[in-house]
Amino acid sequence: MAITFVAHLGYDIFAWLELDLLREKPADEDPYIDDFFIVVGYMISICQCVTSWYFIKTNYVGIHIWDIPKDNDPRPGMIWNFANQLPYIPALTMVKISVLLFIRRLDSHSRLVKYLVWSSFAVVIGLFLAVLPVVIFQCHPVRYIAALNLLTDIMVLSIPIIITARLHIPLRRKIAVCIILCLGIAATAVGLWRIIVLVQATMSKSQGADPTYHVGFCSSVIEVNVAIIAACGPSMKAISTRFRPRLLGSSPSSESDKSAYGAGPSSGTGFGSRISRFSHIFTKPTSRKRTSMYSTANGRGYPSAPPAAPVDWPRANVGSCDERFDLRKYTRGTDSSSMLYLTDDENHLGIIQTTDISVGYSIESVVGDGSSREGRVVNAESIVQRAKRSSDNLYCVYYLNHCTMATNYELPFQLSDPSLLHFESFIGDKWVGAKSGKRFEVLDPGSDKAWASCPANAAEDVSAAVESAHTAFESFRKVNPRQRAKWLLEWYNLTVAAKEDLAKIVTHETGKPLAEAYGEIDYSLGFLWWFAGEAERIQGTVSTASAPNRRIFTIKQPIGVTAALVPWNFPVAMVLRKVGAALAAGCTMVVKPSPETPISALVLAELARRAGIPAGVFNVLTTDLENTPPLSEALCKHPLVKKVTFTGSTRVGKLVAAHCSHGLKKLTLELGGNCPFLVFDDANLDQAIEQLMALKWRHAGQACITANRIYVQAGIYDRFAALLKERTAALVVGHGAVAETTMGPLTTPRSLDKATAQVEDARSRGAEVILGGKPLTSKPGYFFEPTILSGMTEDMLISQEESFAPIAALYRFETEEQAVKLANDTSMGLASYAFTKNVDRMWRLLENLEAGMIGMNTGNQSAAESPFGGIKESGYGKESGKDVAINEYLVTKTGTLTIEGQY
């Protein structure tokens, strides 16, 4: 029994560690309903402690409650026994309910967690309702609840295990936490023995002083109290915080001071001003303002104000906070004027007028260890206050709840204009965070290191962005086309000026070499220039009808709010190609960038803001990989969104089409490629190799129009393979920021795994690896060797799916008819390439190859003036090109006019 007691004690303590790992509840958080479950459960358990102590002291087991009136001389312990048994199950139930509700708030957007929590909640409540009536009429533990109690323990413990598995923490830490919780489940199972002993002792009405019985009973009493105090510590701390403001300091001494502090109904410092906030406990709050207990001000900012409260950076949950910051730029926002400043004491910071904000601070210098650095940025998701005792003095302690940019990350590059960088979503004209407060990291593929974080917006954040775009559309649709063209050209000029900084960001988001990043930006700029001209070329028609007195008119108008779901491989080009056409047509847009490359889209938003593009016309909503499906679905299904454009995989494109079908939305899909590259005997081999080198190895093969299957006619096959191997072996693989690098890493670790699997599949089916073939483990990041496979067949994975990796797969063919058949043997039809000097053959290939774009003796066929799009399962609709791209964002109206008195 002693071992069982220790096991249960460890289980309760580690349950608290697990909850604290998930997320410590801020000390000033308004109470929720689960907080009050904890308080009530704690009071009940205290009563149980008292009655249990007396019950054990009297060494009494008890009889049925209905026998008490019949007993002329009931033992004194009888009533105490009943008083002890009654609160046992309610106290346990309240602990489990509070933990379930707390977990639900930690991961409020996961359907799986939602179902697990509420099903566990139902089981716990059901057990309580089933057992309580028996306890009321019976003075000993219920015999058959052991299995059900174990079931609820397992259900409550399994949910944190599931959440832990999805956290962005080291694998060894995940395993350690899960093992600890599994041990807790095992300890609960061992506890069944204790319950059996209790039942046996009770049913036998033993009156002796059995040490095993006493240890077991003490364990059952202490377990409930340890669970309440330990497992729910963060919530109880939030309750206690509400009752101690007056102990920490005083309110402003005058009305003028109150005005300076911003004091009022929402920022009072006493109990009376806070008690009204308890009305939120039964509803889930959305975005409440938090004001400080002090509403402190800097004496330099407000001459009549007292000195700012000292700020001590906590060491928990915010990474390394040893550095102190000198912030000289105010926050961007309409309702906050907060800023941090370095006080005379190097160990503390002062805060001017704390508010709940979600903005980026620009840091001009970072002071720490006697050094200063430029260009660092801190994201203040929320400013939270705490109280802390230092020696004999009580003072208010403030910290940034999400100061990850300040404490965990260093920019791996220097910018000429650091103010370009933002790490919040852009909605309207504001930089905002997610309602949930969650964030995700942006990794450098070349080093596998995080260098920024962005809001992990969820479906609940979509409406704000769409409504902002819809409000802007009502006026933007009426703007003169020439003015829209001017804005696009100004955006073009600002992007040209920021090209160097933007290229660095693209390199550290995607991994592509700097030279390729510059090339992408130059390519992207063409869309702004082209669509600025297209804005004034939107024309209707007038035609004569069959009836002599009628005329038919057509006019074109912007369709409305549009949504763009863009990929990570060309983050600048994909945004500007879509938004350029939308703005030229008079539409507004909400862009959801890929989780891998959100920063470049936010830089484009900043440049658009500087170009004078009205607020709400261009919005950027960032999110992580987990929230991408529900957020994208919410965007596609939002009734105010009238058109969606998506670039990505065919599988996801089909899901997007299904979502848009609910509202019959206009949709443009640019999907997978699996593009064939045909080289005939009469081709100029040097030309074909030169074009293939740029097409295949650009961005490590991560382009939708890259050459996936390379078909070479038998007469030149060996020579072509040798030339390709010679040129490819000269590639320099490395970090994109290194000047000598000619091929960077893959952007995601998922791509690395897929490439490895495809090479192994080809090798196992008889292909020969004539160059490369494996990941580069000697380098940090997601590097894969440039790989050439020979002797490929149609049953291999690479033949059937996009590789999106630096893998050149060579196939041998004999005749033109065979080559066309092999090239068309795919469900996709984005692009095809053919190299031959036979003009007749080239014309036949143009007509017979099943693809939306045909490269004839060239591998570069994408430009702003050229329609871009595929057929078959590569999607539909066109992006770029004359008329066709802008028409995707227009609706055509037909008007018929009858003329009277026609002669």
Image (cartoon, rainbow, N blue to C red):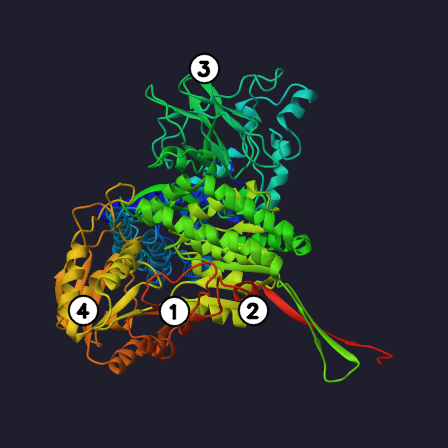
Q: Nearer the viewer, mark 2 or mark 3?
A: 2
Q: CB of mark 2 within 8 Å of CB of mark 3?
A: no
Residue 239 visible in the snapshot: yes
Residue bearing mark 1: 651
Say the numbered circle drawn on residue 665: 2
Say which element carries label 3. loop
Tell me the number on the disc at residue 344. 3
Task: Give the foreground label among 1 and 3.
Answer: 1
Give the distance between the C-alpha atoms of the residues marked 3 and 4, in whole angstroms.
Answer: 65 Å
- Closer to the camera, 84 or 822? 822
The image shows residue 252 at horizontal and vertical percentages of 63, 21
How far apart marks 2 and 1 lie (CA) works out to 19 Å
Q: Which residue position holds label 4?
A: 761
Name the foreground residue: 557 vs 598.
557
Q: Secondary structure at mark 1?
A: helix
Earlier along the polypeptide chain: callout 2 or callout 3?
3
**Residue 100 % position (x, y):** 43, 53
Q: Percent position (x, y) of residue 424?
A: 48, 43
